[in-house]
Image: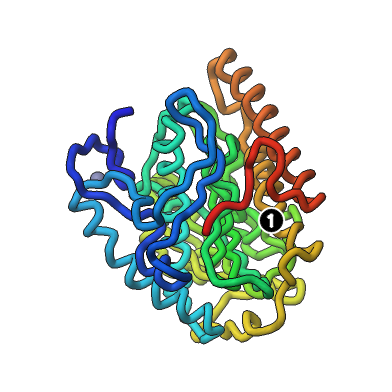
């Protein structure tokens, strides 16, 4: 497999590498010399469980790309530390957290592509730099009590995620960050302009209602301690569909309208609210789910359920070629069946389940 930079995708022979799980996070969650278990990894015609020294879990990057994104790590550290201590944060820090989760999610996707020797034959059409701050995104934060400090990430090794890296969960000590990002994920329910349909060269848009509807995502989510939703206007649409977006409602509910960045929303007691500074995160100090309780297993299953939900959002009718359309449908059906099996096993509390998929980490 040709080496490419995980930020920009350009071929790189440089020795420079990016830690997908940054050093500050490894330090914050335990011994820096510990190993990370990566679960089932396919490579060189073999399938096996792979263990890495945590500080070796790194992938190629250009020197410039690496230094261009360094600021995000130092900013994200402050937000994560504040959340772990249930301290107030600002709305701009939520944007940073969501950017950082975009980076980690896509970094893990490309990292697994490397480790699996790209066994699914995926031709990445985007890299970290193309996917940070590009689509509607959300994070729901849960507290789980009764576990030791550590990092885990779930959902990243499934074929569904390998084909559509839009949903994963990251544990940092007692907090679980359930993260999703997809085009127009909740723009319609938020009252923003949204996509009606898309064909090869045309996108049909609608104006949007101009008011928000609860819940922002129709498929119900386990109630978190706190959640954040941020709409992002897809690149180019502020030019091609300017009149749709140039309306009071969108201006009022944007963080930076000219750059297509929406404000930060949340859901409290059945209502949609727009978060204002400072954001009280005191709810994170309340008692959470107990590890190994029924709710805990439900939480782990939720990632696989929403990966299937996001896979279903894609309309195969957008694929012009009939053979490719049929292949897409078959692959999606197969991938969803694997997720359903994982959900079934998790709900039976069989963590080390069939196919050796499991909640990964150290
Ligand atoms: Zn690069």
Residue 287 % position (x, y):
71, 81
Q: How many marks?
A: 1
Q: Is residue 128 left or right of residue 71?
A: right
Left or right: 314, with 65 as reference point:
right
Question: Residue 299 location in percent, x, y?
Answer: 71, 59
The quarter holding residue 297 reads bottom right
Image coordinates for residue 19, horizontal then vertical, percent: 34, 55
- Mark 1 CB near ligand 1 (8 Å cut): no
Task: Report ligand 1 position as a quadrant.
Answer: top left
Q: In the image, is 122 to the left or to the right of 161?
A: left
Please name the colour scheme applied to the rendered image.
rainbow
The quadrant of the image that shows the N terminus is top left
Q: Residue visible at 64% across and 71% down?
A: 147
Question: Could you say which is closer to the camera, residue 35 or residue 95?
Answer: 35
Q: Residue at x 55, y 71 (%)?
A: 149
Numbered disc 1: secondary structure = helix
**Nearer the observer, 206 or 78:** 78
Q: Residue furthest top?
A: 323
Q: Does the rendering let one see residue 294?
A: yes
- Residue 188, compared with residue 83, is above or below; it is above
Work out whether residue 326 or residue 58 is closer to the camera in this orientation and state it: 58
Q: Quadrant of residue 291?
A: bottom right
- Closer to the camera in the image, 269 or 6: 6
Q: Which residue is disc 1 drawn over? A: 300
Number of other residues with Cα within 10 Å of mark 1, as a class: few under 14, some 14 to 19, many 20 or more: many
The answer to whether 133 is drawn above or below residue 211 in the figure is: above
Q: Residue 45: where, in percent of width, then height?
A: 47, 23
Is 259 on the left-hand or right-hand side of 283? left
Residue displayed at 58% across by 75% down: 274
What residue is drawn where x is 38% and y is 63%?
33
Tell me if residue 207 can be seen: no
């Amino acid at each position: 497999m040709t080496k490419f930079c995980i930020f920009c995708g350009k071929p790189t022979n440089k020795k420079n590498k990016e830690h997908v799980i940054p050093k500050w996070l490894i330090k914050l969650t335990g011994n820096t010399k510990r190993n990370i278990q990566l679960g089932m990894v396919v490579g060189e015609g073999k399938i096996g469980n792979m263990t890495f020294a945590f500080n070796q879990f790194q992938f190629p990057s250009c020197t410039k790309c690496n230094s261009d994104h360094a600021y995000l790590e130092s900013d994200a550290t402050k937000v994560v530390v504040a959340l772990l201590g249930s301290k107030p944060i600002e709305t701009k820090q939520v944007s940073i957290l969501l950017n950082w989760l975009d980076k980690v999610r896509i970094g893990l996707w490309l990292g697994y592509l490397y480790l699996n020797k790209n066994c699914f034959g995926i031709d990445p059409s985007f890299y970290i730099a193309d996917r940070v701050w590009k689509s509607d995104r959300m994070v729901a934060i849960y507290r789980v009590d009764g576990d030791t400090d550590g990092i885990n990430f779930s959902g990243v090794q499934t074929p569904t995620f390998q084909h559509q890296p839009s949903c994963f969960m990251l544990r940092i000590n007692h907090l679980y960050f359930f993260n999703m990002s997809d085009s127009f994920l909740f723009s319609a329910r938020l009252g923003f302009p949204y996509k009606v349909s898309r064909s090869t060269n045309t996108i049909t848009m609608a104006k949007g209602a101009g008011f928000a509807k609860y819940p922002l995502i129709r498929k119900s989510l386990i109630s978190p301690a706190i959640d954040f939703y941020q709409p992002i206007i897809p690149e180019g649409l502020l030019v091609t569909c300017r009149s749709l977006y140039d309306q009071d409602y969108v201006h009022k509910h944007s963080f930076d309208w000219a750059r297509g960045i929406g404000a930060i929303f949340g859901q409290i007691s059945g209502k949609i609210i727009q978060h204002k500074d400072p954001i009280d995160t005191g709810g994170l100090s309340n008692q959470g789910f107990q590890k190994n309780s029924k709710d805990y297993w439900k939480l782990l299953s939720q990632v696989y359920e929403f990966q299937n939900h996001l896979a279903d959002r894609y309309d195969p009718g957008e694929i012009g070629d009939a053979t490719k359309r049929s292949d897409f449908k078959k692959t999606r059906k197969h991938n969803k069946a694997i997720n359903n099996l994982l959900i079934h096993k998790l709900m039976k509390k069989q963590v080390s389940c069939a196919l050796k998929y499991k909640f990964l980490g150290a």
